[in-house]
Image (spheres, grey):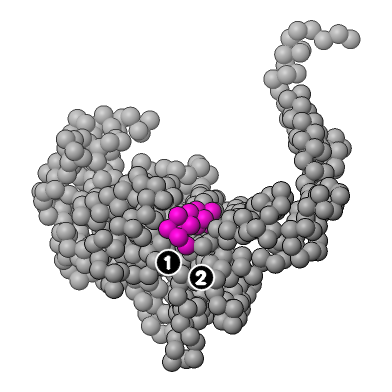
Amino acid sequence: MTAAANTALLKPSQLNTPVAVELIGLNKWYGEFHVLRDIDLKVMGGERIVICGPSGSGKSTMIRCINRLEEHQQGKIVVDGMELSNDLKKIDEVRREVGMVFQHFNLFPHLSVLENCTLAPIWVRNTPKKDAEEIAMHYLKRVKIPEQAAKYPGQLSGGQQQRVAIARALCMNPKIMLFDEPTSALDPEMVKEVLDTMVGLAEDGMTMLVVTHEMGFARQVADRIVFMDSGQIIEANVPEEFFNHPQHERTKLFLSQILR
Amino acid sequence: MTMSEGDLAVAEIKFVRGATIAPRPAPAAMTGAFGWLRANLLSTPFNIVLTVLIALLLAWVIPELLKFLFIDAVWTGSDRDACREVVQHREIGACWPFVWERWSYFVYGSYPIPQRWRVDVFFVMLAIGVVWMLWLESPRRDLGSVYFFVVLPISSFILLTGWSAAGLSPVDTSLWGGILVTIVVASVGIVCSLPIGILLALGRRSRMPAVRLFSVIFIEFVRGVPLVTVLFMASVMLPLFVPEQYSPDKLVRALVGIALFASAYMAEVVRAGLQAIPKGQFEGAMAVGLGYWQMMRLIILPQALKITIPNIVNTYIGLFKDTTLVFIVGIFDFLQTVEVSRIDPKWATPVTSTTGYAVAAIFYWIFCYAMSRYARATEARLAKADRR
């Protein structure tokens, strides 16, 4: 393994600023529908945030704004010191630093697992193919499926596909990882292998924003839990307090529904 | 001992499998030639009726066809007398000597006879290019594409139109004809329509209003006008606006007209493919940091074109047959050379026209069927890749 590839692998890359993501007065509309309302959220480097809430509450939309898969209409989004605007160059720059894992994996079905992982490093970071493959194999080992490298996504189980998706995002050596309901589309038997991978990632100090309904994961990993409903942040607290002493009525109702 | 109702219920509710069941081969009626016949030709009463009807139709058509093309056909002769019933006193099928004599005209049109080797070289070069591109195991396919898209068009242009400095005397395109013209028009149309069509399809889905508007207007205008009109406009109306000395060659005008016409149709085919790609593929590509063109080239188009292969080839086949329309602007494509030859008094017999059209039908069928087969093979190959 080359020295350059080696140093890039060991740890999540460092942020340029202590604040990883900052949302200030964020508002977004889908046509007439006010989907995000005055969102203020500051995420520090290395912090793990779990975002939960009922469906349609805007939690996915919020994290999709962070890498500009959704456009916002009002407010400021600052990612690692870069403010997101209509500037396409800025958007590309932010996307290079922010990895994302989707509910439905969104792997590229016409490329092998290895090619899925090396594509972005080769074309976006101009990494030589050989180095990109070494990095990809490193992360595939880390998500425990190096033996599947030559297969195609359609040949893998849901849990394996989602782990490949995590490896694909990690290959870009991102500073921040976004997870959009990563286990919601999985068979119950597959959920654990994906969550274990994410726990491992958290232990390495990655900055993570995770939209999930897995409350066990939230308790174990999160530094802070953000509860959203109808496009606004209702309550945010450390897991202990959030689960044991919820303040807002909506939060209490939500928790009583899901923790039975 | 008889079981009471209570025992029966218990027996049905409680079940634990002892040994697992090993797979057994399918019943003989499902496999082998007989199984195939039953499943495909004789599965339902309606299917049986269809099978019988089609068998009858084939039994009626095929002997007639063989009789005309081979058994009653005339194979040698030097003029119409060889193919006339009143002279030969027998039933006459196809008049092949007419085709032998006219074949070079069918192939080259009025291309000067001493220069025809240049057309032959062009055919060979084109064949090499096509095989190099389409045969997947051929060596250095990267070089092949350079050859096909750069070397071949330039050298063919020089070879066919002539270049005095290289000792190739100029040949006016009005002398070109026959299969040469058909192949040139079809190749240019096929090679140009896909990239232009892709750009138009992307333009139509673009977020930039000007680009989108241009694409929509172009596509809808071209699709709303018959090809014949496009060709007429290119060859009759253009000289009204552009002085004769500046207006491009007649064949070039027809080429551009056909290429743009096919592009508009191709654009809609490609757009259908783009629309079939799930949104998640775009998002996945954007999220890993790919730019617009990288995303399209590496992720979206490979998948979109794959699912549109049947439609792309369908457009190609239509385009290949549409090349026959260039005759209305006075260009002698293959069909037109047949058309001119069949009314030649030297070969005036009752079977001359039928023979000429049979040759044309065979020619077009071979090319279209070859395209269709290649597309089927490609589909099968990609479908196999999908099952991985």
Considering only order in the chain, which callout, 1 or 2, is on the residue closer to the N terminus?
Answer: 2
Mark carried by residue B251? 1
**Looking at the picture, how far across and down is residue A174, in whole percent?**
32, 66
Q: Is residue A172 left or right of residue A232?
A: right
Chain letter for the residue marked with disc 2 in the picture: B
Q: Are marks 2 and 1 in contact (CB under 8 Å)?
A: yes
The amino acid marked with disc number 1 is Leu
Alpha carbons under labels 2 and 1: distance apart: 9 Å
**Looking at the picture, how far across and down is residue B205, in whole percent?**
31, 51
Q: What residue is at 74 percent from the left and 58 percent from the top?
A: B80
B7 or A143, nearer to the observer: A143
Return the residue at label 2: B176
Q: What residue is at 83 percent from the left and 47 percent from the top?
A: B91
In reply to whether residue B247 is colored magenta, the answer given is no
Chain letter for the residue marked with disc 1 in the picture: B
B96 or B195, nearer to the observer: B96
**Looking at the picture, how far across and down is residue B347, in whole percent?**
69, 58
The amino acid marked with disc number 2 is Trp
Span of residues in magenta: B319-331
On-image quarter of the C terminus of chain B: bottom right
Q: Is residue A117 left or right of residue B86?
A: left
